[in-house]
Image (cartoon, rainbow, N blue to C red):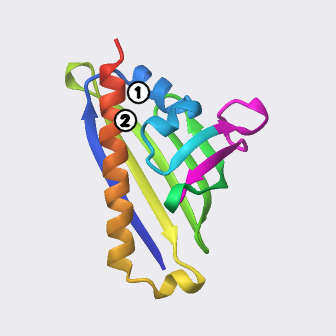
């Protein structure tokens, strides 16, 4: 069983500026509330086959390591990742398209293949939580990119 969520908004900057910001993995903690720090393993470029390593925030100030594989990079229009989400497999990505006025339509999507114990979770609650986090992330991305001179 797979659930999918999407979040999209317009960013008042061109696609190249949005692309550059998202591809700067070290800046992910600025917009992703669960990321304490992030880097591409071995200093490799953000390309298919690369691995994005993260220190993820947990409750009570704890952190843990997590990693995602880069599955697609099509500059400057889309990128995608895959990795675990609990006991399940998740994929997420972003797509960018120019829109009128030199703006960018940005879309973030997440797909989770529910497995094992996660199949017992209420689908609506999990999907709602994923949606809320994506919406927060998208607003933070918009604010960060638009505030860059």
Q: Which residue is situated farthest in the bottom direction here?
A: 120
Q: Are marks 1 and 2 in contact (CB under 8 Å)?
A: yes
Q: Tell me the SS state at disc 1.
A: helix
Q: Which residue is situated farthest in the right direction here?
A: 42
Q: Looking at the image, tell me whether mark 1 or mark 2 is earlier in sequence order.
A: 1
**x, y percentage for residue 8?**
29, 45
Q: Residue at 38% of width from left, 83% of height from top? A: 122
Nearest to the observer: residue 81 or residue 97: 81
Q: Is residue 123 left or right of residue 76?
A: left
Q: Which residue is situated farthest in the top direction here?
A: 149
**x, y percentage for residue 4?**
40, 65
**x, y percentage for residue 120?**
47, 88
Question: In the rendered image, which quarter contains the C terminus?
Answer: top left
Q: Is residue 127 left or right of residue 61?
A: left
Q: Residue beneath label 1, please?
A: 18
Mark nearest the camera among 1 and 2 is 2
Nearest to the observer: residue 27 or residue 45: 27
Please check the rendered image and state whether residue 79 is part of the magenta-colored stretch, yes or no: no
Q: Tell me the SS state at disc 2.
A: helix
Q: Which mark is residue 70?
A: none
Q: Which residue is situated farthest in the front direction here?
A: 60
Please check the rendered image and state whether residue 55 is part of the magenta-colored stretch, yes or no: yes
Q: Residue at 48% of width from left, 33% of height from top? A: 22
**x, y percentage for residue 32?**
45, 45
Q: Residue at 51% of width from left, 37% of height from top? A: 28
Above-or-below relation of 26 to 53: above
Q: Is residue 3 left or right of residue 100?
A: right
Q: Which residues are magenta?
A: 39-58
Q: Residue beneath label 2, please?
A: 141
The answer for how far apart the CA atoms under marks 1 and 2 are is: 8 Å
Q: Say few, some or many: other residues with alpha carbon within 10 Å of mark 2 (under 14 / 14 to 19 / 20 or more).
A: many
Q: Residue at 39% of width from left, 25% of height from top? A: 15
């Amino acid at each position: 069983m797979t659930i999918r969520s999407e979040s999209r908004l317009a960013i008042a900057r061109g696609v190249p500026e949005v692309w550059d910001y998202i591809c700067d993995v070290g800046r992910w903690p600025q917009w992703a509330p669960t990321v304490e720090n992030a880097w591409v393993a071995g200093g490799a470029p953000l390309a298919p086959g690369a691995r994005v390593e993260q220190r993820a925030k947990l409750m009570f100030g704890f952190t843990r390591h997590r990693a995602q594989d880069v599955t697609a990079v099509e500059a400057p229009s889309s990128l995608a990742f895959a990795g675990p989400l609990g006991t399940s497999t998740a994929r997420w990505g972003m797509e960018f398209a120019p829109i009128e006025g030199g703006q960018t339509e940005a879309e973030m999507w997440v797909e989770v293949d529910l497995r094992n114990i996660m199949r017992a979770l209420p689908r609506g609650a999990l999907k709602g939580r994923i949606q809320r986090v994506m919406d927060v992330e998208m607003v933070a991305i918009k604010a960060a990119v638009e505030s860059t001179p």
